[in-house]
Amino acid sequence: MKILLIGDIVGRAGRRAVRELLPDIEEEHNIDFTIANAENSAGGFGITKKIAEELFDYGIDCLTMGNHTWKNKNIYKFIDSEPRLIRPLNFAPGIPGRGYSSFTKNGRRIITANLIGQIYIGPFDSPFRTIDKHLDSLQLDSDILLVDFHAEATGEKGAMGRYLDGKVDCVFGTHTHVQTNDADILPEGTAFISDLGMTGAIDSILGMKPDTIIKKHLTGLPTKFDVGTGSVRLSGAVYDHKENKIYTINKTYNQDE
Ligand SMILES: [Fe+2]
Ligand SMILES: [Fe+2]
């Protein structure tokens, strides 16, 4: 079983990267199951029903979210009825959506869980104590258990990797939009990477047009960020469950809009 993990898809450019590059990547790497972080897929912030459906149509099996989950208000209308879309499990109890979901692929039960960090990202319940509460049943109900840890600080991500080492199959980080060079198998056998990176415009700052970001830093005024355009890149990792390997991938699609 080979699982493709796609880093934060940013806006139209990110969706174009998925559309143009995913078929080749899935074929080249013999991918059985694909997970992508989609918290930035609609105009850079949040997700809509239409965009979730578009991403599923491109061949993505499971979408995870993060700190931008609620940016598009219409998510409340569909998040409860879309089991392939998950949001962090350690959000407050009782709110819409689900923090993990199970899938069956080639006769194997895959569970993806989504957690969010606490350092430099917001006040959320402890992702460590939250996953603890669910771990026994998640292990029991799955053959392959994967965790998207959506967090800012690499130290917190590293701690989650080691905390879940030997308890889940793979912990992959999202949110920073910058791919890390630490994909590895931890001592107890869990595959880990701090951050998958970003899927979107290459000529950008974290997926958004550089001038709008620089203006914000120069002036401190509220600034509308625009999604980058031009050539795009899909960044992520491949987790090979059978071989217990994880390696990063980066594929570029050159086309001017
Ligand atoms: Fe994020
Ligand atoms: Fe993001």
Image (cartoon, helix red, strand yellow):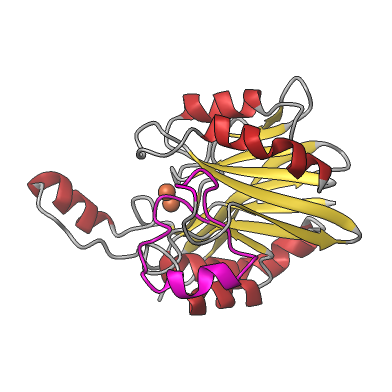
Residue 240, percent from left and from top: 80, 44
Quarter holding residue 189: top right
The answer to whether residue 171 is magenta is no
Quarter holding residue 187: top right
The answer to whether residue 78 is magenta is yes
Residue 94, percent from left and from top: 49, 54
192 and 118: which one is in front? 118
Residue most extreme to the front:
94
129 and 60: which one is in front? 129
Residue 56, percent from left and from top: 63, 72
Q: Kindly identify the residue that appears in the image at 56 percent across and 26 percent down.
A: 158
Q: Which residues are magenta?
A: 65-93
Q: Kindly identify the residue that appears in the image at 34 percent across and 65 percent down.
A: 227
Residue most extreme to the bottom:
50
47 in relation to 169, above or below: below
Q: Kindly identify the residue that appears in the image at 46 percent across and 58 percent down.
A: 39
Q: Kindly identify the residue that appears in the image at 75 percent across and 30 percent down.
A: 167
All told, the count of numbered labels is: 0
Residue 139, percent from left and from top: 79, 40
Quarter holding residue 59: bottom right
142 relative to 230 in the view: left or right: right
61 in relation to 111, above or below: below
30 and 222: which one is in front? 222
